[in-house]
Image: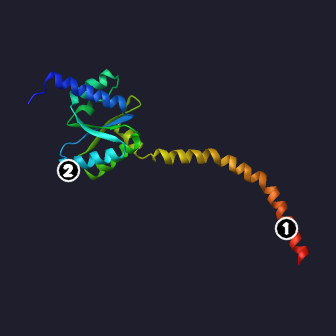
Amino acid sequence: MAISKQQKIEMMAQYREWLDHSQGAVMTEYIGVNSKAIDELRNKVREAGGEFHVVKNTLIRRVFTDADISMPDEAYTQSSAIAFAFQDVPPVAKALTEFAKDHDVVKVKAGILSGRAISADEIKALADLPPLPVMRAQLLGVILAPASKLVRTIAEPARGLAAVIRANSEKENV
């Protein structure tokens, strides 16, 4: 059954809304995946802070063109679905790449990050990043390390002097 022009306009408006509200997106191919596996994937993406939707290639191409996002032509082949990351992109990318490892029929085709197209290899690199709280903690540790080392260095002579005085007082008490 053919889709009416009005339905296509509504679908494009929905795609555009998802794109506008997301931090990024990952475009996948899903040929041969049964509905149970698709539901499992949707749940994993939802837990990662995103949504997974099957899209029409011609309509999503128009939406991307209108948004000045230049995706490679290979991204529009076969059946496509997109995971929109509404919170943070790496967890969504990780959910998709881990699911793709277990299900050979799911392939990451391309993605969008900060309004520009990125390759499947870049999506895999994003998936390998640690979660944002871990990255923040690592950065904070790097920033604080020199300061704490300086404090220890400055306090060391006083500690040494205190140890000498204590040893001397214990020696006199014996």
**Residue 128 — which label?**
none
Q: What's the distance in space between the residues labelled 1 and 2, CA to CA?
A: 72 Å
Label 2 SS: helix
Q: Is the Cβ of the residue at disc 1 closer than 8 Å to that at disc 2?
A: no
In this view, the residue farthest toward the right is: 172
Going by the numbered disc 2, the residue's amino acid type is: Lys
Q: Determine whether, in the image, residue 55 is placed left or right of residue 155.
A: left
Label 1 SS: helix
Q: Circle 2 sits on which residue?
A: 36
Going by the numbered disc 1, the residue's amino acid type is: Arg
Q: Circle 1 sits on which residue?
A: 166
Closer to the N terminus: mark 1 or mark 2? Answer: 2
Question: Which of the 4 image quarters holds residue 65?
Answer: top left
Q: Determine whether, in the image, residue 146 is placed left or right of residue 118.
A: right
For the N terminus, which image quadrant? top left
Give the image location of residue 164, x and y in percent. Answer: 85, 65
Q: Determine whether, in the image, residue 47 is placed left or right of residue 55.
A: right
Question: Which of the 4 image quarters holds residue 60?
Answer: top left
Give the image location of residue 140, x and y in percent. Answer: 59, 45
Q: Can the viewer see residue 96 in this picture?
A: no
**Other residues around mark 2 within 10 Å, as few (<14) / some (14–19) / many (≥20):** few
Q: Residue at x 30, y 27 (%)?
A: 16
For the C terminus, which image quadrant? bottom right
